[in-house]
Image (cartoon, rainbow, N blue to C red):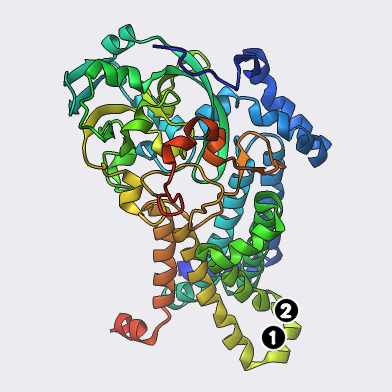
Amino acid sequence: MLVDRLNVGLRRIPAWVVYVAFSIPAPWWLYLGLTGGLGVEPIERLEHELGKLALQLLIATLVVTPLRRFSGVNFQKFRRALGVMAFIYVLLHLLVWLVLDVQILSQIWADIIKRPYITIGMGGFLLLLPLALTSNNAAVRWLGPRWRKLHKLAYPAAILGALHFVWLVKGIQLEPLIYMGIVLILLALRSKWVQRYLAR
Amino acid sequence: MAHRWKNNLTSEEVTAEVLWLNRRQLLSGLAGIGVGAIAGSASASELEPNSWEDITSYNNFYEFGTDKGDPKRYAENLTTSPWAIEIDGLVDRPGTYSMEDILAAVTIEERIYRFRCVEAWSMVIPWSGFELADLLQMAGVQPEAKYIAFETLYRPEEMRGQRFPTIEWPYVEGLRLDEAMHPLTILATGLYGKTIPNQNGAPIRLVVPWKYGFKSIKSIVKITATTMQPPTSWNRLQPREYGFYSNVNPGVDHPRWSQATERKVGQGLFARRQPTLMFNGYEEEVASLYEGMDLTKHY
């Protein structure tokens, strides 16, 4: 069967491929930014590219389980790598905002407190922090069943990430709404009610 | 009618064409030297007009899409000739004014203005155009008129952004009559002495340099003199975020970001923020228009 053949193929690809592949975009964008390849406002562009890739990677981690459940295709072994890279891109996005964009310390704190879309983005980052720190075998062993529970924080983090995007744009724009829609569908697929409905 | 107002950003400060064509390479070279080198030149660069590329490739013109690059990408399809502006409402000579007739009656001059977007980026732009007051006098604004309303072209076949309701189309803006008649307020038809590119609001757009950029409505097809404060597009969508006046004011923050500082476009990856000036640096010229008004309430 096609799915089995696909899974055999996927088993042959080591998980580090994900780390290697996603360690390319960040330095590439930085290089483009330094050489004029990101247009006339490279700071904004770099910030947006990093943030969008972070959200895409976060969504990828949420795709793994429903994809296996509904199609049998198994990306499970790549999930940790996708999650860790998602965190790294959120962190880089945050660093570009802090160091290159806002620059001014007092304004950074004021922005986090006063501006809902920044508060929300920051909240998403804080939710991902313990997940990144426990993305190793030792932590999985140490936490046991609590590990699975803890890592459900990825769900609210993804919602906050998408909301951060929806909220920061001006006017009604399609792209962030599509991201939000995908996140909500992926989370809905996890609810018992939806699963029971789909099983009928 | 021309030259009622004199630039304090003078034409000597406009970079020669050869220079601005090379500035991109120069800047990227500087980026390698480090942050210090660029930070040191910040005060000089504040008055230096942005390059043609900066001004024509980084635009908010949602009629063509919400990405800053969309206007340049898609605006070339816009038909800008023939073009006419319908002037109606409280005017002595209402009617359709063709671009040819308008241009024959006015004197085009250069105005180098600071341009401050509500999103906290800025540019310095060498416009060419004429004072809005000249056109309003051609139409003869009647004494009862208190406001001037403006409308952008609605043509979804050529303006692909209008096929999606990002904001309510057509884009509309408005000024109080004294703001509209102010000698700083111009209708721009050119950039760097050339015809204004479509992505910058061809063939004719408003420029009100002491207000946030979204007040400077592009590709104008209609002007109406009225007694009532006209609706304005962004105010209609999010009144808490965008007021009717929308004067540049570092002391009144936009709810989602601070307005205290701005970043001038085109300074590369290590651009420093610079303080935003009250009325975008035109306080001396326009502060009297708002005397006695609470600018935190009338934002």
Instruction: Report helix, strand or loop for mark 1.
Output: helix
Disc 1 chain ID: A
Q: Nearer the viewer, residue B104 or A130?
A: B104
Give the residue furthest to the bottom.
Answer: A145
Q: Which mark is residue A136?
A: 2
Q: Nearer the viewer, residue A5 or B172?
A: B172
Evaluate if marks 2 and 1 touch, with contact meaning CB atoms under 8 Å apart: yes
Residue at 30% x, 40% y is B162
Q: CA distance from mark 2 to mark 1?
A: 6 Å
Q: Which quadrant of the view contains residue B27?
A: top right
Residue for point 57% across, 26% down? B53
Is B132 in front, or is A197? B132
Q: Chain of mark 2?
A: A
Look at the numbered disc 2 and give the secondary structure of its residue: loop
Q: Quadrant of residue A55?
A: bottom right
* x then y, percent, for residue A178: 40, 59
Give the crowd class for mark 2: few <14, some 14-19, many >=20 residues within 10 Å: few
- In what quadrant of the picture does the N terminus of chain B appear? top left
Do dots 2 and 1 share one subunit? Answer: yes
Q: Report the amino acid beneath label 2.
A: Asn
| Mark sitting on residue A140 | 1
Farthest residue toward the front? B292
Any mark on residue A179, and which?
none
Q: Residue at x 53, y 60 (%)?
A: A56
Residue at the spot 50% in from the left edge and 69% down from the top edge: A160
